[in-house]
Image (cartoon, rainbow, N blue to C red):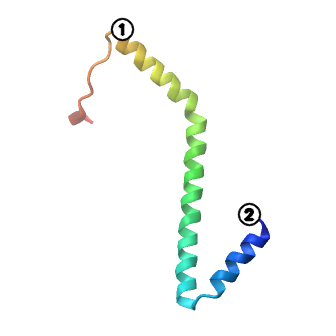
Amino acid sequence: MTSSAITTIVTMVESLPDDLQERVAEHIREFIADLEDEKRWDASFERTQDNLVAAARQARQEIAAGQAVPMDYDKL
């Protein structure tokens, strides 16, 4: 984001009463935290992508070979 975009946002927020500025700031903090969390999840999935593909292939092979059994969710 360019500094002019940030300046515009700051100017808009500064035009609000103090209590609304606090609410906007809290929403922005939560939004940024969500974005950072999403970024960590994306990185985690990217690192494990090959393992997930290999596990899916193995599961397909086991199903094709008749070695798979239905999952008993009560035993989890």
Closest to the camera, between mark 1 and mark 2, is 2
Report which residue position mark 2 lands on: 1
User: Residue 16 appears at what percent x and percent y?
Assistant: 59, 88
Secondary element at tag 2: loop
x, y percentage for residue 72? 23, 29
The residue sitting at the right extreme is 3
Q: How many other residues sit within 10 Å of disc 2, few (<14), some (14-19) or many (≥20)?
A: few
**Image quadrant in which you'd find residue 67:** top left
Q: Mark 2 is on which residue type?
A: Met
> Which residue appears at 27% of the width and 27% of the height?
71
Vertical placement of residue 76 versus 22, above or below:
above
Seen at 21% across and 36% down, the residue is 74
Q: Mark 1: which secondary structure?
A: loop
Residue that numbered label 1 is attached to: 65
Q: Are marks 1 and 2 in contact (CB under 8 Å)?
A: no
x then y, percent, for residue 64: 37, 11
- Marks 1 and 2 sit apart, C-alpha to C-alpha, by 53 Å
State left or right for residue 29 relative to residue 65: right
| Quadrant of the image containing the C terminus | top left
Query: Looking at the image, is mark 1 or mark 2 earlier in the sequence?
Result: 2
Query: What is the three-letter code of the residue carrying label 1?
Result: Ala
